[in-house]
Image (cartoon, rainbow, N blue to C red):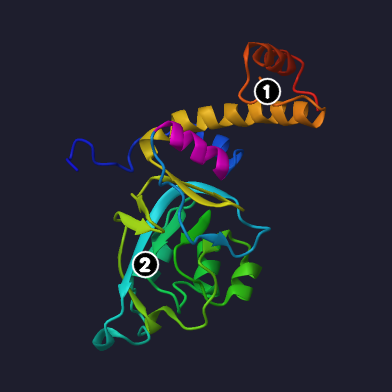
Amino acid sequence: MTEQNKPTADTPLANDTIEKLKQVSTATITMQLLKRGLRQGAIRKARPLDPARARCVGPAYTLRFIPMREDLAGPPKPGTLLPHRMAVEQAPPGSVMVIDAGGAENCGSLGDILVARLKHRGVAGVVSDGPMRDVVGIASVGLPVLCAGAAAPASMNEIMPIDVGLPVGCGGVAVFPGDIVAADLDGAVVIPRHMADELARDAFEQERVERFVLREVKRGRTIDGLYPPDDKATQDYRAWLAAGMPE
């Protein structure tokens, strides 16, 4: 990767991009990514801890763990701002914290107290490819958290935080700071930042078309010529839009 094509978090977004992405599903986003040649945007293992609070959209703020080395293990001392605690205090409001959990399977990278702090600071959500701990407490906080399930031990049981604000690999996906992360009940998806405006526009339109298609299917119309729409279906769709998209 050269400096010329290196992703940057400074690429400006259109004013309505985040809002449009909040109105479309991750399934729609993955289809739009596929149309652009990207097949590996969905983060594996990341599932909502609380199905009632799964949806979030925002720029990625990254945190990376690596496997713990025993001579460096131990509870944090008062006044010590380890990278994961620094991340909690520095993640911008509206961002989604994306955690590379360092292969952890039997510890939580965050617990309810740190998640509560993120919620208070206005962070939009958390996505990790490892487990969380204190999941009942996390659910009570009300922040969307997608992860690989629950584990009782603290992170120091297995992993150590190493850096923030750098590219990470989360659930098989390369995530650069500032990439747009969208999550819902189906999981979490990463949109390269430079594609976000165009993708949001097309995803929003795709969902309107599919809303029309579903309406017609429920009324008994065959999918032949409807999905994808042929000329006749396209005309009907435009008439439906002009009529105010009636149910």
Q: Work out whether 58 lies above or below 28.
A: below
The amino acid type found where label 1 is placed reads Asp
Q: Magenta part of the protein: which range?
A: 26-36
Q: Position of residue 114 (x, y in %)?
A: 49, 71
Task: In the rendered view, tell whether residue 241 sits above or below residue 120.
Answer: above
Judged from the image, the secondary structure of the residue bearing numbered disc 2 is helix
Q: Is residue 32 magenta?
A: yes
Could you say where residue 234 lies in the image, as x and y percent from the top left? Answer: 65, 15
> Hey, which quadrant is residue 3 in on the image?
top left
* Identity of the residue furthest to the left in this view: 2
Secondary structure of the residue carrying numbered label 1? loop
- Residue under the point 74% across and 17% down: 240
| Foreground pick, 105 / 110 | 105
Q: Magenta includes 192?
A: no
The residue depicted at 35 percent of the width and 77 percent of the height is: 159
**Which quadrant is the C terminus positioned in?**
top right
What is the crowding at mark 1: few (fewer than 14 residues within 10 Å), some, or many (at least 20)? few
Q: Amino acid at mark 2?
A: Met
Residue 224 numbered mark, or none: 1
Residue 246 is tagged as: none
Label 1 or label 2, whichever comes before in sequence order: 2
- Answer yes or no: is residue 122 visible: no
Residue 86 is tagged as: 2
Most frequent secondary structure within the magenta stretch: helix
Up-down: is 4 above or below 83?
above
Name the image quarter holding residue 26. top right
How far apart in space, not on screen, are marks 1 and 2 (Cα)?
55 Å
Q: Position of residue 34 (x, y in %)?
A: 45, 36
**Residue 196 occupies quadrant:** top left
